[in-house]
Amino acid sequence: MQFGSGQKVFLFQGLVLALCIFLITACGSPNPGAPPQGVREAGLDPQAEAFLKSEKPKVVATTTILADLIRNVAGENFAVFSILRPGVDPHVYESTPGDSRVISGADLIFSNGLYLEPKLIKVIAATENPAPKITVAEAGNIQPLKPVERSGLFTADPHCWGSPDNAIRYVDTIEKALAQHFPDQKATFAANASRYRRQIQALGGWIKGQIATIPPEKRFLVTSHDAFQYYSKFANLPVLGSILGLSTEEEPSVKKITTLVEKVKKAGAVAVFTETSTSPKLITALARESGVKIGGALYSDSLGIEGSQGDTYLKSMAANTQTIVEALGGTYTAFVPSTP
C-alpha cells in the first residue's frame, strides 16, 4: 500500500512524537518491579535478606525464567533467588550493591548469557565468590540464532528459552551443574528434571497444535522487540518484524518504524503485540498508524508477578500462546500440565 504525501507527513510526525516520548521515558523511568530507591541504596531488600539468611543451599539466577527452571529441578531443599524481579528488563537493568552481596553469598550462580543481562554478567565476573558460575545458554548445546559480534566478542539472540526444545536443554544443563556441586542430591535432581522435561515436551506439542489453528494468511508476529525468533521457529509462526532489535537498549529510528508500518499494512496483519517488560509506547503508535489492534501483552524477558497468568515458565508460554492464537483468529484450547 502506498502513502500519499499528506499521509506520510502525518505518519512521520506521529511516529516522531511517539519515538521522543519513548526515549524520554525509557531513560528516566525506573525498572518496573525493581525495589524502591531507598531500599536499592541500602543494598538489600527483605527478599534478598531472607535469602542470605536461609540455612538451605543457596542458588542465584540472574532472571526470573532461569530461577523458575532451577526451582523445578532443585526442589524444596534449596533456596533459589532471582536477582531480576518480575517485569524487569534484563537488557537495561542497572545493578545495585545488593546484587553483589547476594552473588557473594551464593553456592551456585546461573546466568543466561549471550548478552541478555550484560551488566549482571560483569558483576558476577567481578565477584570473589569461588562458587561455580554457569552461563546456561552458552553451555547447553543450543544452536544460537542471529550470531553477531559485539566489541570483538561473539554473541547471538539470547532468548533461547522461547523454544521448548531449548528449555529442555536448559534443564539438562541445570541438572548437570546441580549434580556436580551437590552429588548427594543427584537422584532427586534426576527425578525432578525428568518430570519437568515431560511437562515441557507436552507444552511444546500443545503450542504447535494451537498455532496451527491460526489461518495461514494471519500467521505472523509483530512485537515490541526481537525476542520471539526461537518461539517463531519452533511453532512455525513467522516474525514479520519488531520495533526494537535483540536488545531493548537499541534506539529505534523513525525510518525503521515507518518501514514496519508499511510491512504490516501490506501483509494485512490483524494485530501486533506489546510485551510485559518493555515500554508499549512505540508498538502502540505502530498499531495506531497501521490501523490494527493491540493483540495483548506477551511475556518476553521476564515472568509475571506471583499469582499472575505468567508466573512460571510453563504458564508464561501457555499465556503467550493463548494471547497470540486468540488475537490472530485461531481456536484456543487450554493447556493442562501433567501432574507430577
Image (cartoon, grey):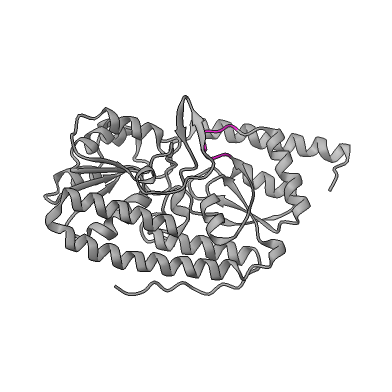
Residue drawn at x 41%, y 53% is 303
- Give the side of residue 7 with respect to residue 185, left or right: right
State yes or no: residue 247 in magenta: yes
Main secondary structure of the magenta stretch? loop
> Image height check: is 87 above or below 330?
above
Residue drawn at x 43%, y 39% is 116
- Give the side of residue 196 with respect to residue 191, left or right: right
Q: Is residue 162 visible?
A: yes
Residue drawn at x 73%, y 39% is 258
Give the total number of marks visible in the rendering. 0
- Give the side of residue 257 with respect to residue 196, left or right: right
Q: Look at the image and give the residue range highlighted in magenta.
A: 245-251
x and y percent of residue 227 in the render?
Answer: 52, 47
x and y percent of residue 267 in the render?
Answer: 75, 54
x and y percent of residue 253 in the render?
Answer: 66, 32
Residue drawn at x 65%, y 37% is 18
Q: Is residue 16 visible?
A: no
Tell which residue pokes out farthest to the top in this image.
151
> Image height check: is 84 above or below 249?
below
State yes or no: residue 337 in magenta: no
Quarter of image, res 285: top right
Residue sitting nearer the eye, 125 or 65:
125
Q: Quadrant of the C terminus?
A: bottom left
x and y percent of residue 189 in the render?
Answer: 22, 60
